[in-house]
Amino acid sequence: MPTYTGISSDAFRHPLDRQAEQALRNLPGFELVARKFMEFVYERPQLVYLMGNTIQVGPRQYSTIYQIFRECVRDLDVYPEPALFVSQDPQANSYALGQENPFIVINTGILDLLEEVEIRAVLAHELGHIKCGHTILIQMAMWAMSAASALGELTFGIGNFVTQALIYAFFEWRRKAELTADRAALLVLDDLNSVMSSMMKVSGGSSKYAHECSLQEFIRQSENYQALDEDGLNQIYKFLIYNGAQGMMLSHPFAVERIHYLREWAVSEEYQQIRRGNYQRSPSEGAVNVAAESSASEAENLRRQIEELQQEINRMKKSQ
């Protein structure tokens, strides 16, 4: 498997990820949320919880998983090596958080459902988030939503700043960030089918009936999903589903959509150049920097879309 020594996250970052982050940063309230987050939120309690209630992976603890993890860390040139924990949870899920001391948590549901090469894809995906500095913004998004709904002005004084527009923008960015992390998985594995297979299984895979699942059929499903856009109304439904029309905003794109984007990149000249060793080297500025600048026109366009979305959601709720 290829190793990308010195690779910068800018070499593989998805343009939609970059664009959504720029729009997010320019929204009113972002800088205040960033300052309050850095002031009040710490990684140590999360690490204390994980040390107390999960299994930390190492040379003598889940040694096979640790070896796969070390290889992914090497191949993406992630330094320092993040901590890796296994949580007892049947849900096939994983996540990465932390800035000063980044860490990855992978549920037992992933280990029980996926083959080793697919587990490698999941670990590389999460390392992609860390490599790109996504984790600090993900934590900020989680904290901002919690503060806005439960704490408000009395505790942190941010009730008037954590606006609905800012929450929408955080979710929009989080979904686009997943496309970048998927690229990291493909770079590490250099095997498109294994990355797509991990997505298929996490979406609806079964250990008992795995032999009855077809990746080619799932790819066909992805193509059929894209074809729905031929009807403009379906595009509206997709947009509303992602942004809370059914009561919950989605933090990840649908797997069939992620497969669509990844298949496009897998045949791109950009991907081929990276595989040949022609890629941008570090240092680079990722999402860790909370003082990045952005285009006012992009932010204004996003605000307008959010206002239109909220109007449509309100209309749909009234008609139910």
Image (cartoon, rainbow, N blue to C red):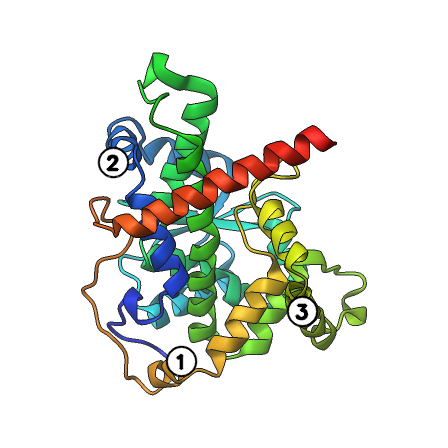
The amino acid type of the residue labelled 3 equals Ala
Q: Secondary structure at mark 2?
A: helix
Where does the N terminus fall, quadrant-wise? bottom left
- Report crowding for label 3: few under 14, some 14 to 19, many 20 or more residues within 10 A (C-alpha): few
Up/down of 70 relative to 263, above or below: above
Residue 190: where, in percent of width, then height? 47, 79
Quarter of the picture holding the C terminus: top right
Mark toward the start of the polypeptide (3 vs 2): 2
* Residue type at the position of mark 2: Glu
Residue 123's place in the image compared with 35, above or below, is: below
Q: Nearest the camera: 107 or 180?
A: 180
The residue where tag 3 is placed is: 227
> Along the horizontal axis of the image, is 160 left or right of 68?
left
Residue positioned most to the top: 154
Q: Residue at left 47%, top 38%?
A: 307
Q: Position of residue 114 (x, y in %)?
A: 63, 63
| Nearest the eye: 66 or 301 | 301
Disc on res. 271: 1
Counting from the top left corner in percent of width and height, residue 29 is at: 30, 32
Q: Residue at x 51, y 41 (%)?
A: 308
* Residue occupying the far bottom of the picture: 276
Which residue corresponds to mark 2?
31
In depth, the one of 4 and 85 nearer the eye is 4
Residue in view at x 22 percent, y 48 percent: 289
Q: Residue at x 54, y 77 (%)?
A: 192
Q: So how many labels did they put on this image?
A: 3
